[in-house]
Amino acid sequence: IDEHHHTEKDVTPEDRKQYLDLLELIKKLKKATDDMRFFDKSQPYVTKTRYIQEILDSKDVYFLYQIKNPFVLCYKPFKYPHWYYGLKDKYERMTKSCEQVSNTYKYFLSDSKHLKHYKIVKFEDMALKLKETVEDICNFLELDFDEEHMIHHPDRNFTSVSTLPYKKNTAHDDGTKDCADKELDKIIADKCADIIKKFDYSIPPR
C-alpha cells in the first residue's frame, strides 16, 4: 500500500493545476455558490489526505472516514469473488483483505495528525443511529442540519439518506455469514486488532 500513500512532498505544480482546474469546472457546471460544498466519495483518497489538503491549500478541506466492523468488512472478497482474483486459498484471501483494511486505517490515523479537519464515523452508527450521526456529521462540516432531508421524496432525482435504514438488519451481517468460519475470524482478530479494540467491535451473531 506504500505506493498509494501520498503526502505533501508528492504534490507537483501539474497536480495542483489539474485538481484546481477540475474544481473550477465543476463549480461552473453546477453553478456553485460560495455557500455550497463539493463532496467526493473516492476510496483511494483515504491514503492521500495530506496530499489533497496540500493541493487545495485550504482550511475548508474536511475528511470523513467511515469505519466498519472488520468481522464483516474483511469477508467482502468472499461475497465478491472477483476481488483478489487468483488467490484460491481462502485463508490467503482473508489475510490479504485484512491487511488492506488494517493498513488503510493505520495510514489514515497517522496522517490525521497533519489534517486540519477530520472525523471517523462508524458505519453501524449510520445504519442504527441515523439522525444523531447525520446531525453530528453536519456539525463537523459546519453545515445546517435539516431533518427534512432525511425524509424520502419520490419526486427528487437523488438518493436520500433516508434509504439507509434498510441496512439496519445487515449492520452486523451484510450477507457474509454463510462463508464465515472460526479460522477466518482468528485471522481478522489478529490482523485488525487495533481497529477491533478502539471501536469495540466483536464477532457478530451468525
Image: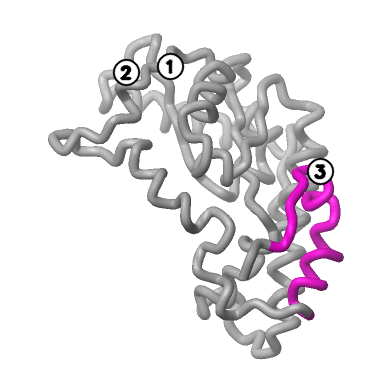
Q: Position of residue 45 (x, y in %)?
A: 60, 43
* N-term-proximal mark, 1 vs 3: 1
Which residue corresponds to mark 3? 198
Which residue corresponds to mark 1? 145
Q: Residue furthest bottom?
A: 88
The amino acid beneath tag 2 is Ala
* Among the 4 quarters of the image, the one containing residue 96: bottom right
Local SS, label 2: loop
Q: Which residue is pictured at 34% across the width and 29% down the height?
A: 150
Q: Residue furthest left?
A: 155
Main structural element of the magenta stretch: helix, strand or loop?
Answer: helix
Note whether 120 is above or below 4 in the view shown.
above
* N-term-proximal mark, 3 vs 2: 2
Note whether 160 is above or below 82 in the view shown.
above
Q: Which residues are magenta?
A: 183-203
* Among the 4 quarters of the image, the one containing residue 99: bottom right
